[in-house]
Image: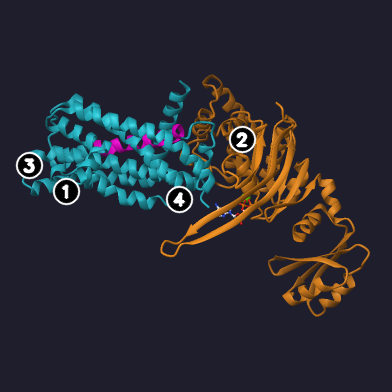
Chain colours: A orange, B cyan
Amino acid sequence: MGSDYAIEADDLRRTYRARTGWLKPTRTEVEAVRGVTFEVGRGELFGLLGPNGAGKTTTIKMLNTLLIPTSGTARVGGFDVVKQTKQVRRRIGYVFGGDRGLYDRLSALDNLRYFAELYGVAPREQKRRIAELLDLVGLAGRERERVEGYSRGMRQRLHIARGLLHSPDVLFLDEPSIGVDPVAARELRRTVGDLAATGTTVLLTTHYMAEADELCDRIAVISDGCIQALGTPAELRKHADGFRVVEVEAYGVPDTAVDTLRGLPGVRETAVEVKGALQLLTVHSDAHVDVQGDVLRELAGIRLGRVNSREPTLEDAYVAIVSAA
Amino acid sequence: MSTLRLLLVGTLLHAKQISRSPFEVAIALVVPVVQATLAVYLFRSGGEQHRLLEAAVGAGVMGVWSSVLFGSGGAIQNQRWQGTLEMIMMAPRRPALVILPITIATGITGTYALLATLAWGRLLYGIRLDFAHPVAFVVAAVVCVVGLGMFGLLLAATFVLMRNANALANTLEYPVWLVSGMLVPITVLPAWTVPVAAILPTTWGARALREATSGGPVWPSVALCLGISLICLLVGFLVMGRVERRARAAATLALA
Ligand SMILES: Nc1ncnc2c1ncn2[C@@H]1O[C@H](COP(=O)(O)OP(=O)(O)O)[C@@H](O)[C@H]1O
Ligand SMILES: [Mg+2]
């Protein structure tokens, strides 16, 4: 239908304006998305990867008609998301992670029936379609129970079934694996992969690198409301070319020591991740400089655990891209 | 046809969802008893024994009104909390068609308040349920409920747009009770309230029910209630479309 792309975003921007306080109202403005441009091909599985607050949800909501962009335009299936809202809505499904978005005091079946009606699924087809989807997400047999008794994983699967009722061309998945256990998350990734394989275009947001790496044909790394890098996982990995990574397990590293490490010659980035009593120090350096000796010298007198020097992974590339922003 | 089905299925499911809320159940158990008691004592002390039934009906209509007011607001607010407001508003339907079943469902749960108030009045205070026009009473009750649901659509539009619309609901409850003469006759109210009352469907609904209870020309009031409600519905349809768009611009469909 005219357009080769399932999704086209052209310089999308979104500013949230809010007034807080009654007596002394103060206006706050948040520039959540500042000029995002990308295209997603038909049947492609596209990932928006970025840390919390990067603007992923805002971007998705502009594409799925829930938010009107402050500026810029977007098309889904060739239809403008602001001017041809209804045409867009007929063709898209939206699923987000977490506990919300379902009628808890109703059964899964009631939820699905209602949304089938909202989406105009023909009455004669509803029964078959609902049974098919309950099967697909593995909820068959539990459909008459109230949703409030469901586990996170079950809710998530019901969410997905709901999003697929009208067989959408484009599926928006906003952090679908948030809070579900690893086994359920793997199931979910399989379902999503299958959907894309059968021709559904999927736009997935996540802050898990591994999830994006496993699923996506292409990934846009977003932070601070801007796309910092875009490409296939292999292409993104190149952002870490010429890097080397030193990881040090330590106990009680003062902030000043971390700052000094960052100042060492050849060091590009440092990051500290706290895991209980343990701190995991990650130091990115130029590949041709061996910084391990310098790092250990700076940390003299601090109790250290394992020290490891390795080639960069896609995750390191992601960290490099986001922290360079 | 598909629109009618949507309204029907939607109303049923929202009525189910609302009636299963523990909070709603508690309210539904307590409020009618309080209302019946209030009505009886107000009128007894006024020495108007013969108007007990009328008072109970008036109190019952207040129940319907509260249900619609807090219902249309509360249901929207609840759906915002549950994250379902976004989900239903992004369906490829006219926004008013999505919201109307919710407000009618609140009207239906409100009817329960009306019936329960009467039942408690009968049970606790021995109010004789001898209606002047029983058939007209039933018709008036149905029109009243549907009318309030349609009026609720207008209210709901406000709630879709405003994130803290609860404040508005709280300030609207008692004035409308009073102004529409649900409990006290309009004639004792100041003159400025008359035109306000005349355009509220609640006024005519309450009046029709009162007339059906203690005698009077029921049908004109029923017709007026229905007419004003239909206007509310029409305006609601127009407003809702705009409101939905503004809500998408102002980002008020979601919580934060
Ligand atoms: N309704 C809102 N009002 C004001 N600020 C918001 C609103 N929604 C999101 N934000 C802000 O916009 C930024 C981007 O948020 P979001 O798009 O939710 O990011 P992500 O989904 O990547 O975590 C954040 O700083 C967030 O606090
Ligand atoms: Mg998000």
Q: Determine whether label 1 and label 2 are within 8 Å by CB.
A: no
- The residue sitting at 88% across, 74% down in the picture is A294
Type of amino acid under label 2: Gly
Type of amino acid under label 1: Pro
Which residue lies under the disc numbered 4?
B163
Q: CA distance from mark 4 to mark 2?
A: 25 Å
Mark nearer the viewer, 4 or 2: 4
Image quarter where the N terminus of chain B lies is top left
Q: Position of residue A104 (x, y in %)?
A: 48, 42
Instruction: Using the image, determine if residue A127 lies above or below residue A267.
Output: above
Q: Earlier in the sequence, mark 4 or mark 3?
A: 3
Query: Mark 1 and mark 2, same subunit?
Result: no
**Marked residue chain, label 4:** B
Q: Residue furthest bottom?
A: A301
Q: Secondary structure at mark 3?
A: helix
**The residue at label 3 has a CB less than 8 Å from ligand 1:** no
- The residue sitting at 90% across, 58% down in the picture is A242
Which residue lies under the disc numbered 1?
B190
- Residue B127 visible within the image: yes
